[in-house]
Structures are given as C-alpha cells and as structure tokens.
Amino acid sequence: MNLADGYSLMLEAAIEASRPDPELRCDEWAEQYMVLPKSGPQPGPFRFDRSYPARRVHQVLSPNHPAKRVVAKVASQMFKTQTALNWIGSLMHRRPRNILALEPTDTLVKRFSARVSTMIRSVPELRERVAAAKSRDSRNTTQAKDFLGDATLYMNTAGSAANLAEVSAPYIYIDEIDRLDLDVDGEGDPVELAEARATQYANDCKFLYTSSPGIEGFSKIDTLYEMGTKEKYFVPCPHDDCGHLHSLEMEYFRYARDEETGFMDRAWFVCPGCGADIDERHKVTMLPDEAAGGLARWVSTAKGDGETVSFTLSAFYMPIGAITWLSLARQLARARDRLKRGDHEAMQVFYNTRLGLSYKNSESTTTAEQLRRRAEDYPMRVLPDAALVATMAVDTQPNRLEVQIEAWGPGMEHWVIDYIVLNGSPTESADVPGSVWHRLDTIRRTPLLHASGRLIMLSAYGIDSGGANTQDVYNYGQARKALNCVVLHGSSRPNRPIMGSAPSKVDIDWGGEKVKGGVELWTVGTDVAKDWLSNRMQLTEGGGAMHFQLDLPPEWFDMMVVEQPHTKWRKGRPVREWVKPNGARNEAWDVSVYNLALAHQLGLQKWSALDWKRLRDKLIPPNLDLFAVAPQPAPVFDSVPAPVLASAPEPAPVVDIAPAVPVQPEPIPTTEPEPAAQTVQASVPPPMQPPASEPAAPAPVAPAPAPQAPVPVATAINRPFVGRRILSRGIR
C-alpha cells in the first residue's frame, strides 16, 4: 500500500466518522435499545407484540414525521406512559434538545421521574449520557436531568403558570391533561401556555398529549382529539369467510350469565360484517398489525388540521394476559346496576378509564329549553300559598350585583319569585344614593306579598364574598349583621356541609383601619348543594321541587344548566366537582346554591309538618283569609329611583315569633302605626333556628299600642290592600 492509498483510506474514514448516525424512527429505537425493568409485567427488551397499536404512535412521534401534535385519548394502563418514555429516551440518545414533561400533581411528577431514572439505569446508551444521581449533584434531580448535548429533561407540574413559563423546549409531553385546570392561574389554557415554550423552534418541535377523558363537553383531550385525524384501530373478523375490518365498539359487545347460577360466564363481540361471534381467543390473530404480519391497522376518520394526529383506543384491545373481556363485562354490569339507582360514578369511571371515552352524565342532561318549558305563570315577588319563608342571595360581579329571591315551603319546596340585576360598581358606599348597595337595602326593606294578601319580610339574606370585591362585601355584611345579612364563601374542600355549623372570624378594613375578626364568614359546601339541586331539577312538585317563573330572563335558564359534574382523580381517589366552560356565566346557579345554604342556616330542612302548620297559623290566621285580596305584581326595582322606598325611616324591632312553642290566639301588636299602602317598611328578623327539642318559654309580648280607630279593609276594586306586617320567623 502506497502513501496515496493510505491517504485515501484516512480520508474515507474521516468522512465516515463525520457522517451523522442514520435516522432511527422512534419505534425502531424502542425495539433496538429500550429495556423494560424487572419489576414490570414484561421485563426485558421492549417488543411491540404486547402493544401492536402503539407502533404507529411511535412512528408519528419520530422527528422526521411532519406531525406537530400527537394526541392519544386512550384507556388507562394501555401504552401512554411507556410510549412517552420511549420517545424521551430516543430524544436523549439521538436528538439532544431540551424536553419538558408535565404531570397534573407533584405526586405524579415524582412517580414519572422515578420511571425515567429506572429507564436510564436499564439502558446503557442512556446511562452513559446522564450524570449519576448524587446528593450534591444538581444535574440529576427529581425535577431535572442533564444529559449530553447540553440539554435537560425538565419534569414539573402543569398546574402553575410559572412552571410553564420558565423553560424553553422544542419537545413537550403533558400527561393526563384532563386532570388539569382549564385555566392555569387565570393565565389561560395549559396547552397554549405549554406550546408557547417552543416558539423559538419553528417547525422543529413536537408535542405529545395523553389522557383518559372526563365529562363530555368539558374534556380537553376530546378537544385535541377532534383537531386531529381521529384514528381508530381496525381489526379483521377472524372468520375465514369474512375478514371484515372494524373497530371494537360498545354497540357490538355482548355478555351472558349462566342460566343456573346467574353468574356472568361469557363475553364476546359480534362482527358487524357477518354477525358471527368473536371470542377473546381470537385476539391472537386480530391484533397484530401489518408490520407483525397481521391485517390490523389504524384508520383515519377525519382530515384534521394538518398538524395534529390523534388516536383513541379502549381496553378491549388489551393483549391476552391483561384484563379480559369478561372482567370488563362484569364491571359494565355493575355500573349499569348502580346507574339504575341513580349513581353515575361507576359508569363514568368505566367510560373514562376502560372505553377511553368522555361520559355524558344524564344527571345533568336537563337543558335550558326543558327548564323554560316547565316555567310557571305566577306573580313575581309574591309568595305562593304553600310558601311561608323568604330568602335572598346576592352574587357580586365587578360591575353589578345579581339578586335572587326565593320562597320556601314544606319539604324544602321552593319558588324563584324574583331575579334582579343591579348595575353599578360594588366599590361605592351604601351611603351613596343610587349605589348598588343602597338599592340592595331598598329591596331588603321592602316586604313581600303572600298569596293570602299578608305581607312577609325576608328571613335572611346572604352575599357571596368571592371575587374582586371581597372587602366591600365584608364591610357591607358587618354593618348589617343585626339585619340578618350573612357573608358567604364557597368551600374549596369537597363534601362539606351545605352550610357550616359555625362561621369563621375574618379581619376587615374598616375606614382604613384593620378590625381583627370584624366579620363572620360562613362556609358553603357548594358541591353538595349543587348535587342537591341538580338531583331535584326534574321535580315539578313536592319536597325539593324548584319552581321557575315565566318572566325570568332567558339567560337565567342557560346559567342554571351551564355547569356539569366532573370526577377528578386526586391521590388515587375520585373527587367529584362541578365545572363550567371558560367564560360561561353561572350567576343564577350560584345564587340558587346560596339560597339553599340560607335555608339550611334557618334550619328549614329539619322542620316537620307540625312546625310549618304552627308558622302558618301564626302568620296567616284562617279567619283572616276571607278578606285577602288577589296578589298584585311588585314593581321592578332596578327601574325605580332609589329614594322612593328608601326615604322612610327604619321601624322599631318586631317581637320574635316562635311557632314551635304554644302560641297566643290573638295577634302580636306592633309599636308602629299602620303603614301607608305600597310603602311598608319593617326590620329584618333574626335568623330562623331549627325546632327546639324541649318546649321553650313563651316569647315576651310587646306592650299593646294605644287604641286606634279601626282601619277599613280595602278591596281589590277600590284601593290596594293595607294589612299588618307579617315576618316569616323561625322556630327557636
């Protein structure tokens, strides 16, 4: 060999050494390098014979595939996490760039980080590229792992906007995206925030989103899936004379019980092509894809947006040795049995975790149109004959107050008798004429008309302190505590009582000075209250039924059905909560919840039929019903100038009425003269209490006023009714 030949060989070797490694698809890398841990169900080298459908998902994740967004809406324990690990491992080995992996909770972050560490230890090619974990080495921690190429794998929670804003990365993985808040720290969609981290990488970026879905209409993975190609895994019919390609859908699933024992002993599919039975043993020939010598393949059912490839897969595709069709059938049968009893939780779990489908909760299928059709024609601000107690709840918004008045009767049957929107800023003082708080005081002071013709005052009213005007609500409520004004706040913890047993003391800013424990804050178990209302939404009469008025604003009915129950998994346990779409209004729903809480504070849920009868006998003596006039609609308060009803002075307190104790046959007189027609003023009574277990001493009777000339009874023809002021009071 001469020098020229040696030079040529050296040049060829240098060129070959400088040539980049051949591009490996993600699926090829997984089969060549990935080693599964000994603690797993299938230790040893990774093979797709345990998860044939996952092969194409790996191929789409490869850097040379044009897809920008990969979405996997699949059942639990399918291939989501292992696919993400294979993808991350291939990037660390062959394409070193920053990677961002996001989980819903800190616990899941630690769990995923542990699996990444196990992968690094099991794969020699990765072990060479990642620093060993040491107590003093910041390059290999739970939340960050540096690897060759001056790149880092970041692992964090997706529940904080700060976590989504600190890192710039072209490759992003978000797990269980339906377990995330739809609005992260008030800064927007977690998907948009995450993808903004790859802005600098143009088309050289890729995002992987995986999750089992949640409630239909509130599922983020559903939204992402609809953006893409919506691919389903089609398998051939195993019978030789058919071979029809189809997906394993619920409509073709069957199961049967043993006639003698009643135990379920068989589950199968029916081929939509030939109608023949397909047993689970046929999975061996049905599931292999074309790369494994089979006929199964992914079939796109939509064109998509050109950037997103989306997949869905159910637990029916589990390999032999995993959960069986018979086990799934038994779970489905149990869920159907619970559904017959009104329990939707088991069916939702089956749909989400086994079918990989979002669940449409029939508890909440009541539509706004259905509510409008069952609205009733009764006068506004008039208590029906069956109702004896009135409450008022207020929701605060930055530019208005939304007020709802409800009437309550036996069995917690209730009627919405007014819904008022008071436009104006809650930052204005109640002392300012025309302010929202001033107008709210006017409504509070104005008595309500009963169907019998008697006048009844509010027993209690409450204001939601959540939102941007918390301190304004505190100041207003503290000043009117003696008038039965209750400051309310929804509980952040699930399964709390509808109304707390005792308030908490909260500091307030009163005239620029801090007042320690200046206001009592009552906590409302909003999720339990919403469940209570939702479960009774279809009732038209009787205990718990809610009645609506025809003249309520059209948007009121929309707000009553905008929220849906949603089951989230926290610390391995399902947690039921109510959610609404971003930007949707729900003020009517909220004030309905707070009115229910006020009814519970008054103890109405504990009242017996005898308690209600005693209250009726006290407020509406039967011998006076003959002189009652037909109720007349009340004026619309937002259109009435504030000074009209607010100019009259506050009256003296009225003596408490306690229906639970023996009552006097004669009515309790007041110390005030009879008010003028249509301008009746009265103080708000103390909160109603539940019935006493033992007879209490009779309430003291106020001294009788000086004799006055009898007031002639007005008729419906010549003038409005002028009657005694009647306060709907509780039972002590």
Image (cartoon, rainbow, N blue to C red):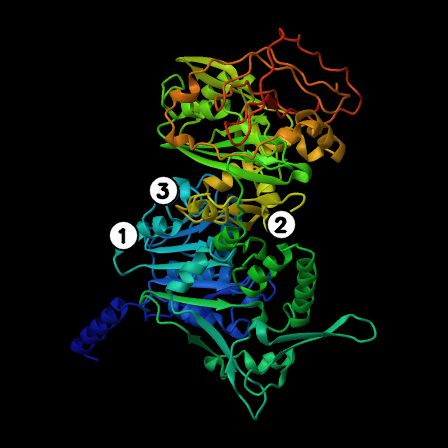
Q: Which residue is mark 1?
A: 199
Is residue 303 shown to the viewer in this render? yes
Taking depth in this image into account, of 250 and 520 the one nearest to the observer is: 520
Circle 2 or circle 3, nearest the eye: 2
- Is residue 441 placed above or below 557 in the rendered structure? above
> Which residue is at the front of the view, 1 or 157?
157
Alpha carbon distance from label 2 to label 3: 40 Å
- Tell me what residue is drawn at x 39 percent, y 40 percent: 186
The residue wearing badge 3 is: 187
Q: Is residue 574 visible?
A: no
Quadrant location, the C terminus: top right
Q: Secondary structure at mark 1?
A: helix
Q: Residue furthest right?
A: 260
Query: Residue 617, how many percent across, how many down?
Result: 71, 27
Q: Do the residues bearing badges 2 and 1 touch, measured as CB atoms within 8 Å?
A: no
The residue wearing badge 2 is 539
Q: Residues within 10 Å of mark 2 (few under 14, many from 20)?
A: some
Do the numbered discs 2 and 3 sit on residues whose CB atoms are within 8 Å? no
Three-letter code for the amino acid on which mark 1 is drawn: Thr
Q: Secondary structure at mark 2?
A: loop
Q: Amino acid at mark 2?
A: Leu
Q: Position of residue 628 (x, y in %)?
A: 61, 30
Name the N-terminal-most of marks 2 and 3: 3
> Relative to the observer, which residue lies in front, 91 or 573?
573
C-alpha gap between disc 1 and disc 3: 17 Å
